[in-house]
Amino acid sequence: MILTVTPNPALDLTWHVDRLTLGETHRADAGAARAGGKGINVARVAHAEGASVLAVATAGGRSGVEFAAELGASGVPHRLVPVVGATRQSVAIVDAHLGDTTVVNERGLNPSDPEWATLLGEVVDALPGARVLVISGSLPPGAPTTLLPLLIGTARDAGVPVIVDTSGPALLHAADAGASVLKPNAAELVEATGIADPVEGARSLIARGTDLVLLSLGARGMLAVTASDVLHARLDAPLAGNPTGAGDAAVAACAVLYADGIRDLETVLRRATAWSAAAVLMPFAGEISADWPALDERLVVAPFVPAVREERP
């Protein structure tokens, strides 16, 4: 079973417009409201692909009621911890003309210490049946700095590998706590480490205690970095679509393989890149196209060669 934890879930609101113009009024067909947050999206993808999952998150306020109802209707197994603070909302506006997406994320409200303790208790109760723990998404402002290390340490003590997708100082805390896999994107890696070179930045996380860094490069594909190897996977041509769930699909792919005991670096990288690309083709985060095997066949996988900088005389 894949156990996911979403510390800062969101009610995702998505609208599709013909063309987004700043400062203008737009008309759109009825939007969609879905239970979201990165860990929820990971669980949706893995569940749809036949994996056993359990999604743990919080829910509160009127937005939390809608969040819980939609998640219940989705069929994804879950446990929600009631909290006083309202579940945040995330707004995605998909521009059909440009083929890109503008996202506005509320920061979220920090649960109380007893509410965090209840969430930790749900994780502890579920760990005996878990093959991998995924902790995915941002932390609400004011969240305890001990939260990620406590979750990671609890899973490690139970012999369960941990995959973490987060940003900022939390990314460093996850590396220090010994997360098995970290999945930042290029901007998040630079922000957390202060290192511009992607391989050096990833290796700095490995030096802190993680085993594998899956680094999203957007249209340029993905890197898999360990202490000894660096592999690069990319499609033969870029895709246009909605990239908001691409990273979550990559994490889901890694989680499914880890739950099956598969650790081969190229296998993990290929699946993560193919599922990430397949998510771009879908209208909502938490879904991947059934054509992902065809995308896998289009992947170019090779040792990473960094761009050569021209030196001025």
Image (cartoon, rainbow, N blue to C red):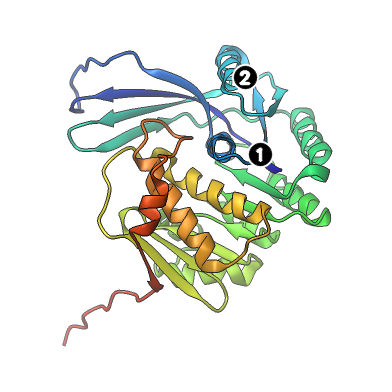
The correct choice, above or below, for 20 with respect to 195 in the image is above
Specify whether 130 is left or right of 25.
right
Q: Amino acid at mark 1?
A: Val
Residue at image point 29% right, 24% down: 16
Residue 127 in percent (x, y) is at 79, 44
Residue 236 in percent (x, y) is at 27, 60
Residue 290 in percent (x, y) is at 42, 40
Specify whether 46 is left or right of 23.
right
User: Looking at the image, how many numbered discs can be counted on the residues?
Assistant: 2
Q: Please, what secondary structure does the residue beneath circle 1 have?
A: strand
Q: Residue furthest bottom?
A: 313
Q: Say whether residue 166 is visible.
A: no
Front residue of this view, candidates 125 and 63: 125
The correct choice, above or below, for 289 with respect to 148 in the image is above
Q: Quadrant of residue 90?
A: top left
Q: Say whether residue 218 is visible.
A: yes
Residue indicated by mark 1 = 5
Residue 186 in percent (x, y) is at 41, 58
Q: Residues within 10 Å of mark 1 (few under 14, many from 20)?
A: many
Specify whether 17 is left or right of 204.
left
Q: Amino acid at mark 2?
A: Gly
The quadrant the N terminus occupies is top right
Residue indicated by mark 2 = 72
